[in-house]
Image: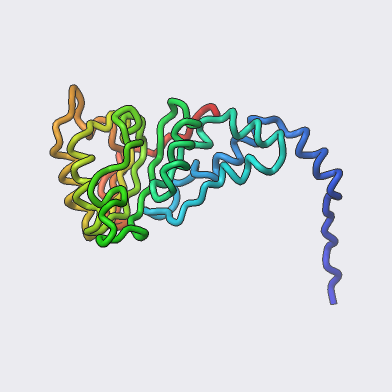
Amino acid sequence: SPELPQTTYLKPRMHSVFLSNVPPEIIASILWFNVGGDIGQRKAHPLPYYPQSLNFAHVCSRWRYIVESCPLLWSTISLSWPDGLVNHYIARSGSVPLTLVFTDNHLSKSNASESFVTAPPAYLTSSVLDRVRALYLNVSAVSQAVWTDIIKAHSFPSLEEFHVPGTYGEELVRALLSAPKEDQCISDTLRALTIGGRLCVKSRSSRLPRTL
């Protein structure tokens, strides 16, 4: 039988030395594509989404410094996380554009005190919504009304991507397109619109950040 090629593995110490020589901007770029930088290349509603930046920050002190120094690594946020974790990500993300991912699978009509059932959470301020670049909404009858009100009430001046489910998505799209926008038409910024995974608008390719 043919001889299989040997695989060379780095010893733990060699592996550590190799990583210590990788420039921090290269590590940040690699981590960015793991925490949501390539989210536009995935299917609509890329869920579940986990707080990976927190995990990377616990690898070692160097990675912690890199992660905590790079706002983009905190800019993809699941609104299904606990409020405290969402607030932590918003604070760490600084002023960079945000990608918000939402699913209401964890919500129930029986618990009317939950966020998005009767009202949006306090962290969804105008300053936060003004920074939203991409919005992935997997809503149902439980949260549709609240999200419709959010979309009608805000201008979303930075929104480039809008992804919604087929069943309730059309109502959200109508709310987005019909809401009055100050000094701006939503079509000026919107690059990609999907309803139920079906691409309806694509004006040009999504931009990747030039710097981290």
Q: Residue at x 67, y 30 (%)?
A: 24
Residue at 43% in and 49% down:
81
Compared with 94, 30 (above or below) is below
Residue 74: image location, x then y, percent? 50, 36
Q: Residue furthest bottom?
A: 1
Answer with left or right where residue 7 lies relative to residue 30.
right
- In front here: 109 or 181? 109
23 with respect to 106 (left or right): right
The front one of 174 and 110 is 110
Above-or-below relation of 48 to 36: below
Quadrant of the image containing the N terminus: bottom right
**Residue lying at 49% horizontally and 44% vertically, measured from the top left:** 36
**Number of marks in the image?**
0
Residue 7 percent coordinates (x, y): 82, 59
Q: Is residue 62 left or right of residue 188?
A: right
The x, y position of residue 93, in whole percent, is 48, 31
